[in-house]
Image (cartoon, grey):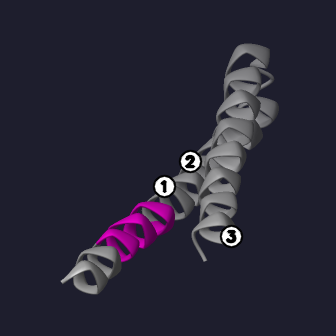
Amino acid sequence: MWNVLLRIKLIMKTKENIKDRVKGSAREAKGKVKEVAGRAMKDRNLEGRGKAEKYAGKAQRKVGEVEKVFDA
């Protein structure tokens, strides 16, 4: 019984880790697009927001990777 509950908990945590990594990668890509668009249009505000979003996505992706290491 306890083994089944532990396995379910591990599976749920693994899904959260994957979700963090996927969302982080998507956010990172979206930020990169904004950054390049801002640079192309010489819009420093858009470029800055893009960089911020890119780094936030990178951090979110890393959180998912770190959680995966500690759950294993």
Gap between marks 3 and 1, in whole Å? 18 Å
Residue type marked 2: Arg
Can you give x and y, in whole percent of width and height, for residue 18 in the image? 48, 69
Q: Is residue 52 or residue 58 the one in the foreground? A: 58
Residue corresponding to mark 3: 69
At x 24%, y 75%, the residue is 5
Residue type marked 3: Val
Q: Is residue 45 or residue 56 the one in the foreground? A: 56
Residue corresponding to mark 1: 23
Tag 1 near tag 2, CB within 8 Å: yes
Q: Is residue 26 above or below residue 30?
A: below
Q: Earlier in the sequence, mark 3 or mark 1?
A: 1
What label sits on residue 54 in the rendered view?
none
Q: Earlier in the sequence, mark 3 or mark 2?
A: 2
Mark 2, secondary structure of its residue? helix
Residue 63 left/right relative to 1:
right
Residue 10 within the segment the image draws in magenta: yes
At x 24%, y 84%, the residue is 4
At x 61%, y 59%, the residue is 67
Tag 3 near tag 1, CB within 8 Å: no
Gap between marks 1 and 2, in whole Å? 6 Å
Name the chief secondary structure element in magenta.
Answer: helix
Q: Residues within 10 Å of mark 3 (few under 14, many from 20)?
A: few
Can you give x and y, in whole percent of width and height, for residue 27 in the image? 56, 47
Q: Which residues are magenta?
A: 9-18
Mark 3, secondary structure of its residue? helix
Tell me the quarter of the picture where residue 29 sits.
bottom right
Q: Quadrant of the C terminus?
A: bottom right
Residue corresponding to mark 2: 27
